[in-house]
Image (cartoon, helix red, strand yellow):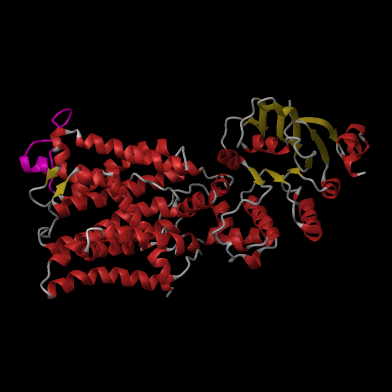
Amino acid sequence: MADLQTVLELNDLRKTFGALKATDGVSLDVRAGEIHALIGPNGAGKSTLIHQVAGSLAPDAGHVRFLGEEINALTVAQRVRRGLGRTFQVSSIAPEFSALRNVMLSVQSTQGSSFRFFKPVMRDRSLIESAMEKLELVGLAKRADIVAAELSHGERRQLEMAMALALKPKLLLLDEPMAGMGPEGSKRLTGFLDTLRHEVPILLVEHDMEAVFSLADRISVLVYGRVIASGTVSEIRANRDVREAYLGEED
Amino acid sequence: MKRETIINWILALGLLAVPFAALSFDEPFYITLATRVAILALAGVGLNIALGLGGMVSFGHAAFFGIGGYAAGILATHAFNQEPLMTWPLEIAGSNSMLVIWLVAIVMCAIVATVIGMITLRTSGVYFIMITLAFAQMIYYFAISWPSYGGEDGLSIYVRDGFPGLNTLDPMHFFMICYVVLMVCLLFSALLRDSRFGAALQVARQNEVRLASTGIAPFNIRLVAFVISASMTGLAGALFADLNRFVSPSMLSWQVSGEIMIFVILGGVGRLFGPLAGAALFIVMEFYLGGVTEHWQLFLGLILLCVVLFVRGGVVGILAGRQSHG
């Protein structure tokens, strides 16, 4: 039985597409205060796993438990309202809205009902102020009025992070946040995530090994839908199977 | 003032000026023409909430336009014949009060739209277009085969329904009723667009995945918007029936769905006053070009083609430039 410190627990999760076992009995957990990294070569089933955690794909078998409750039956939106925040491999934003209005939507969601028809949002200080706060936190405050479609790749990543944080999440699901960020951006983001873990635990899916090894408290290695190893950074570095299956490619 | 705001004022005051000019030149026919524009614009304003804000390409809004029309026709007929609509379990009499008729039109459309929306909104894209069309066609054929209310021949409203304190048979009075209803609905649309609900609805169009991962279920937002949209178009239908003092299944036909969509696209999808600009242009072309040639719709088609290909913001887009979001 999981103790209270366990925020997310995956228990023997299975998902097949025809003959392909995309998720083959995956069990792992994320505890308070930690960054748990999920790595694996392309096609290992990382995205499929993320979908099942987020709720956009239903597992064939197994359980997803979040904050001690099974959430298998909940929709994406319901899981988010319970505190499961996420960012996407390819940034997902409302392109026609300004950065500020994007974040305001998250704030609006945490404040309760969206079925309010008359009060203009742009005169709603509670929305604007909380949203600006998050934009400042990710370093995007100066670009608040820019239409999201015109933001650079890196800025969209920052915007998505601000949107995720504005939801006051109890767990963050980050899907390759370093992708396409460049060395400078990756370094900045690494520093940011390093401090963030004390506020909210993170399940980090990432290709950038340098970032993973410097950030992760624990690492799970996914190959062909199975977790072949799970442990601390040094344990994973020393693991022979992992070196063969994955890290070996880089040597 | 923003350029679009100025355009909106010109459109609003321009429509208001037409009947007064018509009156001073003693050409009362133009009052009716302006009334037609106001009513059809209202139908477009309704569709614009679903199509423009929410990205729901409903090809079945004639259903709501027609239901509104039949609400007016049926209630008025019963009132005229002094027969109750039903006697059991409770007696419901007909009515020739516009206020009652509008309420019935709105409520009926809301109910039907909830049922249609629950089913159609599980689909998207081409499927959504086709299923909304299919529902509208079902209602169309139902109306044709419903002999108690005229079937294919339709239903005449012998006395135009009344409004407290006004003489609705006076074209000017009736125009003012339609004009005020249109302006109130435009104001409501503007508030809706800028509200929390409007923000969620616009993100449902821009990026559904984003909305869901913000913790807001896109389906619920879309359904409510669809119902509001349908009710507004239904209100326009009730006014249209009163304008013509006649309602027939042709109000429910798919051509009407297409025309309402044309108002929105011509005027500018998602632009507040787009449907008014679109409906005005449509009626003007129908009237003047229709007087020159039967084939005026060929020119309408060409203009529509140009709007879709070259200016996605429609008439309002040409005049006011790109849309800005706060």
Q: Is residue B95 magenta?
A: yes
Left or right of residue B269, residue B137 in this image = left
Q: Position of residue B66 (x, y in %)?
A: 24, 45
- Tell me the quadrant of the picture where the N terminus of chain A can be found: top right
**In the figure, residue A192 lies in which quadrant?**
bottom right
The residue shown at (19%, 47%) is B100
In the image, residue A233 lies at what x, y percent?
A: 88, 41
Report which quarter residue A249 is drawn in: top right
For image coordinates 40% across by 56% down, the residue present is B192
- Between A161 and B143, the one lying in front of the other is B143
Up/down of B289 relative to B136, above or below? below
Question: Is B12 left, or right, of B248 in this rendering?
Answer: right
On the image, the x and y values in percent for residue A158 come to: 68, 57
Residue at x-position 13% and y-position 72%: B23
Q: Position of residue B296 (x, y in %)?
A: 26, 60
Q: Left of B223 or right of it: where is B40?
A: left
Q: Is residue A119 visible?
A: no
Residue numbers of the magenta segment: B77-96
Q: Which is the main secondary structure of the residues drawn in magenta?
A: loop
The answer to whether any part of residue A6 appears in the image is: yes
From the image, which quarter does the C terminus of chain A lie in?
Answer: top right
Q: Tell me which corner region of the image, top left, top right, bottom left or bottom right, holds residue B303.
A: bottom left
A90 over B166 or under it: above or below: above
- In this rendering, the answer to whether B272 lies above or below B70 is below
A198 is within the stretch colored magenta: no
